[in-house]
Image (cartoon, grey):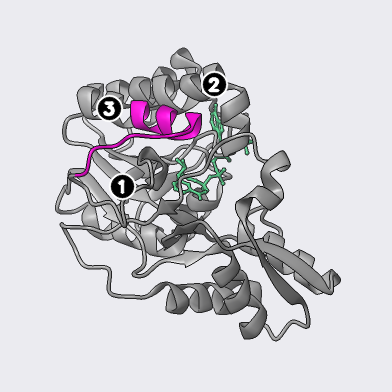
């Protein structure tokens, strides 16, 4: 019989790949209406009922600006609920995987590795770091994977690449920020990494992202040239969009690992995503 795997935030981008790519597990993927992770009673009830062997905790408030203006809710969802889930997972002996982020760092170093000291500069980063710490406390054997700018999902997604694609198909000129850089993580690759890591019970903090670094402008340029779109891209500084963004962003969200190799560069990763999902 296939072991049961629970993925929280079942309708999120990352969870979509868990549902598609891990059929060797019996995947249970409740959305927020079916399992609100802040409802401790509902969490305990579901875990005791299903007794999953593995929990991939992907649910989060991921809108950085919303977290900045709703810090208590961000703490409740990203930190407190993550700790409660880890505690409940430990009680049933489930393997626990927490998805974290490069936003736990201040972005002042050229890149960040697993042993670097976190120092988040916005509330999203602070709430995710608090989540990491509670997870490590309540489930010491948990795997915590930090990813960088996550790409994935189809054209309907409200994430950066799909947004740029929609705009580029209708606008002749597009302003895109070129003074902040990050690493890319393709959600598909991340799920494959987690899947490979489960049998050996990998635990502790791991960074997972493609090699190299890019700005949003570099991503848009690669997308526009690969898809042969007629839009003209205009590089702008982040102050151009300052009024739309409540939260400060680190200058550099670049992840590297001292624990394993990132062999594929971000351009190859992005082109693969475009071929897989956006054509
Ligand atoms: N996106 C990135 O660039 C990025 C980068 C690094 C790390 N990460 C981390 O990677 C993980 C997955 O990210 P993603 O991009 O797949 O996020 P996503 O698409 O925003 O999915 C997150 C899911 O969590 C759900 N959720 C929010 N509050 C919940 C609650 N109280 N109970 C249950 N579900 C709840 C959301 O539901 P609703 O949509 O209905 O609110 C959404 O379906 C997150 O932990 C995130 O912090 C993301």
Q: How far across and down, in percent of the image, does residue 47 sit? A: 37, 26
Q: Which residues are magenta?
A: 116-131
Which mark is first along the chain, 1 or 3?
Answer: 3
Q: Is residue 215 visible?
A: yes
Q: CA distance from mark 3 to mark 1?
A: 13 Å
The residue nearer to you, when weighing 104 against 279, is: 104
Nearer to the camera, 3 or 270: 270
Residue 267, how many percent across, how many down?
46, 77
Q: Earlier in the sequence, mark 2 or mark 1?
A: 2
Q: Is residue 127 magenta?
A: yes
Kindly state the secondary structure of the residue where label 3 is placed.
Answer: helix
Vertical arrangement, residue 23 with respect to residue 57, above or below: below
Can you give x and y, in whole percent of width and height, for residue 127 in the image?
43, 27
The answer to which quarter of the image holds residue 65 is: top right
Q: From the top left corner, tell me how far across and down residue 233 is, in percent.
A: 71, 73
Residue matched to label 3: 133
Say few, some or many: other residues with alpha carbon within 10 Å of mark 1 (under 14 / 14 to 19 / 20 or more).
Answer: many
Q: Residue at x 64, y 34 (%)?
A: 246
Structural distance between the alpha carbons of marks 2 and 3: 17 Å
Residue underneath mark 2: 71
Q: Residue furthest top?
A: 41
Q: Callout 3: 10 Å neighbours few (<14), some, many (20+)?
A: some
Numbered circle sitting on residue 145? 1
């Amino acid at each position: 019989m296939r072991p049961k795997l629970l993925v929280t935030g079942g309708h999120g981008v990352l969870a979509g790949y868990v549902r598609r790519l891990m059929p060797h597990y019996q995947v249970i993927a409740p959305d927020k209406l079916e399992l609100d992770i802040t409802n401790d009673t509902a969490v305990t009830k579901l875990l005791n009922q299903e007794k999953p062997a593995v929990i991939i905790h992907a649910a989060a408030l991921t809108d950085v600006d919303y977290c900045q203006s709703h810090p208590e809710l961000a703490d409740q969802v990203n930190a407190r609920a993550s700790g409660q889930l880890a505690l409940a997972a430990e009680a049933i002996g489930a393997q626990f995987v927490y998805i974290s982020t490069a936003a736990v760092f201040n972005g002042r170093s050229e890149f960040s590795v697993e042993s670097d000291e976190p120092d988040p500069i916005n509330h999203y980063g602070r709430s995710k770091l608090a989540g990491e710490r509670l997870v490590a406390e309540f489930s010491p054997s948990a795997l915590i994977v930090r990813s960088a700018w996550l790409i994935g999902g189809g054209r309907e997604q409200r994430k950066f690449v799909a947004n740029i694609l929609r705009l580029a198909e209708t606008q002749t000129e597009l302003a895109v920020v070129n003074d902040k850089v990050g690493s890319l993580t393709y959600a598909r690759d991340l799920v494959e990494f987690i899947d490979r890591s489960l049998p050996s019970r990998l635990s502790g903090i791991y960074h997972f992202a493609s090699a190299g670094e890019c700005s949003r402008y570099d991503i848009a340029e690669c997308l526009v040239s690969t898809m042969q779109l007629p839009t003209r891209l205009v590089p702008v500084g982040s102050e151009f969009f300052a009024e739309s963004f409540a939260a400060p962003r680190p200058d550099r969200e670049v992840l590297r690992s001292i624990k394993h190799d990132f062999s594929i560069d971000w351009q190859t990763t992005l082109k693969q995503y475009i071929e897989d999902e956006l054509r």
